[in-house]
């Protein structure tokens, strides 16, 4: 097993990786920016290195600073968490060329799946269903208009290099498309350095379902069930649950088989997620994208399948067999995760500030993965995620009741936060029934 691990990230995911590393007897090394010096992950690491000022470009995305920290601390491996450099193929390649162990998929797999158009074409060739859309970037506005006419409105306008719900727009007609195309292209160039745009069919009433895969050291790819991710604001997830209340055993078998094919098509190793759009009426699903990293919502899979996905990542990276029997994966129970963000619960606009009160809920089936505690300052430099509230139980109904109590007990004073939104959601009949889709938050507002 790896002996020392540098976590190239911050907040709750850094704490999450450090916790498993220390349980396995691995020396855990944190890197942090000046803004994060007092956060729990820095204190809990066996060693911590300051790598720069608050600006992520000068700290958490600073490859030279991270590699220098790895060298000075004698780190053997690097875990990128999610966000920042986690899906940066060049960073992965540089880490490995530096003689370090990269806890993630190979650079070639990251590259192959990082471009949305290339990924769509690869998946189609592998027999994975894809939504109607362009097989090449729309070179200009006229090409986008022609493609949309062939696909049929409404269409989704997407940044080919985008991810995480960013760089997307919906057009119901040509006039809207002309506006959205220019907007998405400009955003993509600014955020990703690549203005390539693809056009896909847009499904107004659809569910967002994803499959957790794990590429093993021996070359096999296994699927650890699906997660429902349809509670979203601005195309970004707020709630995830496993198993999905919309997925039957027959549909699950098809989803998981397609996800395995997707992983095999790129020789995938380590943890990854195949995201799909599901038409709940027809049972058809379409490949959306592949996240070549650990997902924020991985804990719900951990509960349902009884595995520690970070441990499995480390085992794969070390060339070891998994701790579980890949041929005997059996789901059990239900789990729901709520993303506690520093944002107002109505318009979901960021609300940083000093945390005056922080009281986490406890109880059977309740887990909190937090990045902060009382007295910490939530700064405007990073993602608004404060913590993840994960609730598990034998049935979905049991989990819903436990989640109500847990949300009521979660006390945060200081920064704006969305805990009241979850209290509202858990009383919403559409959500409680399980028959919801990606438009649920809009209907609640």
Image (tube, grey):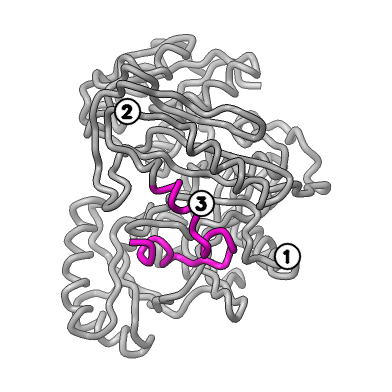
Which residue corresponds to the image point at 63% horizontal and 51% vertical from the top-left? 242
Say which residue label 2 marks.
Answer: 413
Q: In the image, residue 233 lies at what x, y percent? A: 36, 56
Which label sits on residue 426? 3
Residue 209, image x and y in percent?
Answer: 55, 61
Image quarter where the N terminus lies is top right
Determine whether, in the image, residue 225 is placed left or right of residue 299.
Answer: right
On screen, residue 358 above or below 406? above
Q: Quadrant of the C terminus?
A: bottom left
In the displayed structure, does residue 337 sit left or right of residue 137?
right
The span from disc 3 to disc 1 (Cα, nearest Å) is 29 Å
The residue that label 1 is drawn on is 253
Residue 235: x %, y % from top left = 37, 59
Give the overall secondary structure of the magenta segment.
helix
Q: Is residue 48 magenta?
A: no
Which element carries disc 1, helix, strand or loop?
helix
Q: Earlier in the sequence, mark 1 or mark 2?
A: 1
In this view, the mark in front (1 or 2): 2
């Amino acid at each position: 097993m790896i002996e020392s691990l540098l976590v190239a990230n911050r907040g709750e995911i850094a704490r999450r990786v450090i916790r498993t590393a220390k349980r396995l007897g691995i020396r855990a090394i944190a890197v942090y920016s000046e803004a994060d010096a007092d956060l729990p992950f820095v204190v809990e690491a066996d060693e911590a290195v300051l790598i720069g000022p608050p600006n992520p470009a000068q700290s958490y995305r600073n490859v030279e600073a991270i590699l220098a920290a790895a060298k000075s601390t004698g780190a053997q491996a690097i875990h990128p968490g999610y966000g920042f450099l986690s899906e940066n193929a060049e960073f992965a390649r540089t880490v490995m060329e530096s003689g370090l162990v990269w806890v993630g998929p190979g650079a070639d797999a990251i590259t192959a799946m990082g471009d949305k158009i290339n990924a769509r074409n690869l998946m189609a060739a592998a027999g994975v269903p894809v939504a109607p859309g362009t097989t090449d970037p729309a070179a200009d506005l006229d090409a986008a208009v022609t493609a949309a006419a062939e696909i049929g409105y409404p269409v989704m306008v997407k940044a080919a290099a985008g991810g995480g719900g960013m760089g997307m727009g919906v057009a119901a007609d040509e006039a809207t498309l002309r506006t959205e195309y220019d907007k998405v292209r400009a955003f993509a160039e600014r955020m990703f350095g690549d203005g390539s745009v693809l056009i896909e069919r847009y499904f107004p009433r659809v569910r967002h379902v994803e499959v957790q895969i794990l590429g093993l050291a021996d070359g096999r790819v296994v699927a650890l069930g699906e997660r429902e991710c349809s509670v979203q604001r601005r195309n970004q997830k707020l709630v995830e649950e496993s198993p999905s209340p919309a997925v039957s055993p027959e549909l699950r078998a098809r989803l998981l088989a397609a996800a395995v094919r997707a992983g095999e098509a790129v020789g995938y190793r380590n943890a990854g997620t195949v995201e799909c759009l599901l038409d709940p009426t027809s049972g058809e699903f379409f490949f959306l994208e592949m996240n070549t990293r650990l997902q924020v919502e991985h804990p719900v899979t951990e509960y349902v399948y009884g595995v520690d996905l970070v441990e499995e990542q480390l085992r794969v990276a070390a060339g070891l067999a998994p701790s579980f029997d890949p041929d005997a994966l059996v789901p059990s129970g239900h789990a729901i995760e709520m993303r506690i963000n520093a944002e107002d619960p109505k318009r979901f606009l960021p609300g940083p500030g000093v945390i005056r009160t922080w009281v986490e809920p406890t109880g059977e089936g309740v887990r909190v993965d937090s990045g902060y505690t009382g007295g910490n300052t939530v700064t405007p430099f990073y993602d608004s995620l404060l913590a993840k509230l994960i609730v598990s139980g034998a049935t979905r109904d049991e989990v819903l009741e436990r989640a109500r109590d847990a949300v009521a007990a979660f006390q945060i004073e200081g920064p704006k936060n969305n805990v009241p939104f979850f209290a509202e959601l858990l009383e919403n009949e559409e959500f409680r029934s399980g028959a919801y889709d990606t438009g649920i938050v809009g209907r609640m507002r």
